[in-house]
Image (spheres, rainbow, N blue to C red):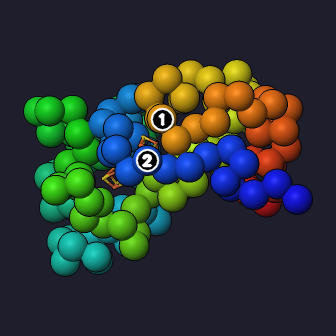
Amino acid sequence: MPSDKDFFDCKECGECCKGYGGITVSEKNIKDVSAFINADIQEFIGKYCVNVGNRYILSQKKDGFCVFWKNKLCLIHPVKPKMCKDWPFIANVIKRPEKWLVMAETCPGINRNASLKEVAEYVVKYQS
Ligand code: SF4
Ligand code: SF4
């Protein structure tokens, strides 16, 4: 049976916390993170989110890193958004396995030699 390590070995470089289209925060994320940092929801959205169309994403600092990235740590690790928790086994890879190689350009932990078919199959299981 394949495991995470067959496809991914995190190098803890922090590059995935540096923008790349933004980290979407769901309504549940907004509630969870607000509670975690002891902010009310409007305060959290105003200080830490950006509205992009019909959704919110986490703000970035001037250096491009996520507003919650500090001293090489995620300040909201226990309640971080689903995309951060799932990375790199994100649902988009199921529909577009070639995205795996695009992600590998910025994430040195991704095994770019893995079969894209096997990656997609693994992500289906991961997400179910
Ligand atoms: S970019 Fe990839 S290897 Fe680097 S910390 Fe993020 S997940 Fe780990
Ligand atoms: S929420 Fe945490 S894991 Fe996600 S991008 Fe921000 S610092 Fe990185």
In the image, residue 99 sits, relative to residue 40, either above or below, namely: above
Amino acid at pointer 2: Lys
Whichever of labels 1 and 2 marks the residue nearer the N terminus, that label is 2
The image quadrant of residue 95 is: top right
Element type at mark 1: loop
- Rendered location of residue 91, percent (x, y): 68, 43
Closer to the camera in the image, 45 or 8: 8
Question: Which numbered circle lies on residue 11?
Answer: 2
- Using the rendered view, name the quadrant where residue 51 is placed: top left
**Looking at the rendering, which quadrant does residue 37 occupy?**
bottom left
| Above-or-below relation of 76 to 114 | below
Residue at image position (32%, 33%) is 19
Can you identify the residue that label 1 sits on?
108
**In front here: 48 or 89?**
89
**Disc 2 secondary structure class:** loop
Which residue is rendered at x = 14% and y = 33% of the image? Answer: 63
Is any part of residue 95 visible from this angle? no
